[in-house]
Image (cartoon, rainbow, N blue to C red):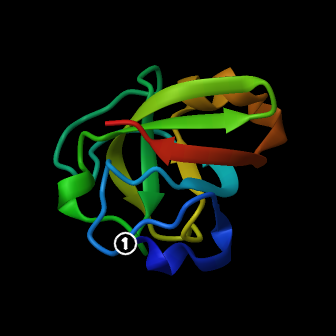
């Protein structure tokens, strides 16, 4: 499944079918979105620490899994609740509350690294 990440990953490569046991550190850009009804079927608010992941790697099995995302010295733990159709494979679309843990909303887009944590 994560073979789609190609050059957007660093670290050990996971095999196809890996989900949250994948120890790979991925990289891409983080943006933010206004939360609501997500692809996983639940409602989220802008104040929740949630994330939409690229539609290129999303599967229903990832719903509710957690990601540790970092940008520079800052990090945030978020829960997968939605897909991001416009995101590249390594990108994350964070709720405003989660994005603010990594940068300023006025930045709009920031570089991130991330990995599944459970």
Residue nearer the viewer, 66 or 24 = 24
Residue 95 in the figure: left or right of residue 6: left
Q: Tag 1, which secondary structure?
A: loop
> Which one is nearer the viewer's eye here, 13 or 51?
13
The answer to whether residue 32 is visible is no
Q: Nearer the viewer, residue 22 or 104?
A: 22
Q: Residue 44 appears in which quarter of the rendering?
A: top left
Corner quadrant of residue 64: top left
Q: Is residue 94 above or below residue 74?
A: below
Residue for point 25% across, 65% down: 59
Name the residue furthest front: 12
Q: Position of residue 27 (x, y in %)?
A: 66, 56
**Left or right: where 63 falls relative to 73:** left
Where does residue 32 sit, x and y in percent of width and height?
60, 43
* Residue at x-position 27% and y-position 44%: 37
Query: According to the image, label 1 marks what residue?
Result: 15
Q: Is residue 3 left or right of residue 27?
A: left
In the image, what residue occupies the spot 55% across and 60% down? Answer: 12
Vertical placement of residue 59 versus 39, above or below? below
Circle count: 1
Rendered view: 6 above or below 70: below
Q: Percent x, y for residue 42? A: 19, 39
Q: Is residue 18 visible?
A: yes
Q: Quadrant of the C terminus?
A: top left
Query: Residue 3 at what x, y percent from top left?
Result: 46, 78
Asked whether, in this view, residue 79 is left or right of residue 86, the answer is left
> How many C-alpha atoms fall within 10 Å of the one at disc 1: few (<14), some, or many (≥20)?
few
Quarter of the image with the N terminus is bottom left
């Amino acid at each position: 499944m994560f073979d789609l990440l190609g050059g957007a990953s660093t670290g050990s490569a996971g095999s196809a079918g890996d989900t949250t046991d994948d120890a790979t550190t991925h990289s891409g850009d983080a943006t933010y979105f206004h939360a609501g009804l997500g692809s996983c079927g639940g409602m989220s608010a802008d104040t929740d620490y949630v994330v939409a992941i690229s539609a290129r790697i999303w599967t229903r099995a990832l719903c509710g899994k957690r990601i540790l995302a970092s940008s520079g010295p800052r990090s945030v733990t978020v829960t997968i609740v939605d897909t991001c159709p416009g995101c590249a494979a390594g990108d994350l679309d964070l709720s405003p509350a989660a994005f603010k843990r990594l940068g300023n909303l006025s930045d709009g887009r920031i570089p991130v690294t991330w990995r599944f944590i459970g």
